[in-house]
Amino acid sequence: MKKIFILLITFFFIISLAEAQQRERPNRDLKPLQKLEQWEKVKLIEALNLNEDTAVRFFARRNDHQKRMKEILDQRDGVIQDIAEGIKSGANTSDATYKDQVNKLLMLENNITKERENFLNSLSDLLTPQQVASLVVFESRFKREIRETLMGRRRGPGKD
């Protein structure tokens, strides 16, 4: 959850910086997160060398995947919140209850992995194995760059 929170903060920070620098450019009415998503899509099309038809089909499938992932992540966040509230309240919660909650959390973590695997496997009719590999590398690097940009900005220059 901490990673997700940091990633979201990174997204918002980068978006606000980009928006401040691009006041003169079109699409000013778009929300910062939408701008970041558009930029990511453009970069993905370039990285995967997608034609228009394949790009449309790919992003439709990817959007469905992201919706399913959001649902699972929301459920996971709910379980984590329940655990945190139980701990914070100091209620006389039994060990069995905590064990059940942790098991729910582990099940949801497994569902995240399964969903990711299903999505990547579902791309075999759209992308070559090399393009799927490029997608995995792109997503990893994109997230890392955003995280590093956010972390670098938070520390400030010369505070490493």
Image: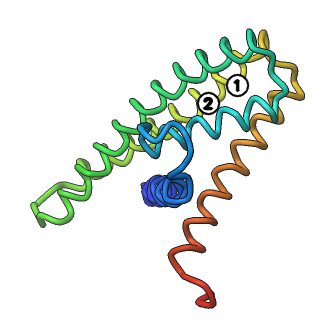
With respect to residue 99, does 158 lie above or below?
Answer: below
Percent x, y for residue 51? Answer: 81, 16
Q: Which label sits on residue 116?
A: 2
Instruction: Label 2, secondary structure: give it.
Output: helix
- Where residue 24 appears, as percent x and y from the top left, is 54, 49
Q: Is residue 77 left or right of residue 57?
A: left
Q: Quadrant of residue 115?
A: top right
Identity of the residue drawn at 82% across and 29% down: 48
Where's residue 160, x and y in %? 63, 87
Number of other residues with Cα within 10 Å of mark 1, as a class: few under 14, some 14 to 19, many 20 or more? some
112 vs 26, nearest the viewer: 26
98 is higher (above) or lower (below) than 159: above
Along the line of sight, the residue nearer the viewer: 149 or 110: 149
The amino acid beneath tag 2 is: Arg
Q: Which mark is residue 43?
A: none
Marks counted in the figure total 2
Taking the spot 45% from the left edge, 54% from the top edge, the residue there is 12
Label 1 sits on a secondary structure element that is helix
The quarter of the rendered structure image containing the N terminus is bottom left
Q: Which residue is label 1 attached to? A: 120
Q: Are marks 2 and 1 in contact (CB under 8 Å)?
A: yes
- In the image, farthest residue toward the front: 24
**In the shown orientation, is residue 145 left or right of residue 95?**
right
- Residue shown at the point (63%, 40%) measured from the top left: 39
Q: Position of residue 25 (x, y in %)?
A: 56, 44
Q: CA distance from mark 2 to mark 1?
A: 6 Å
Apparent side of residue 8 relative to residue 49 in the rendered image (left or right) = left
| Front one among 126 and 146 | 146
Amino acid at the residue labelled 1: Leu
Is 132 on the left-hand or right-hand side of 6? right
Crowd rating for badge 2 (residues with CA inside 10 Å; few <14, some 14–19, many 20+): some
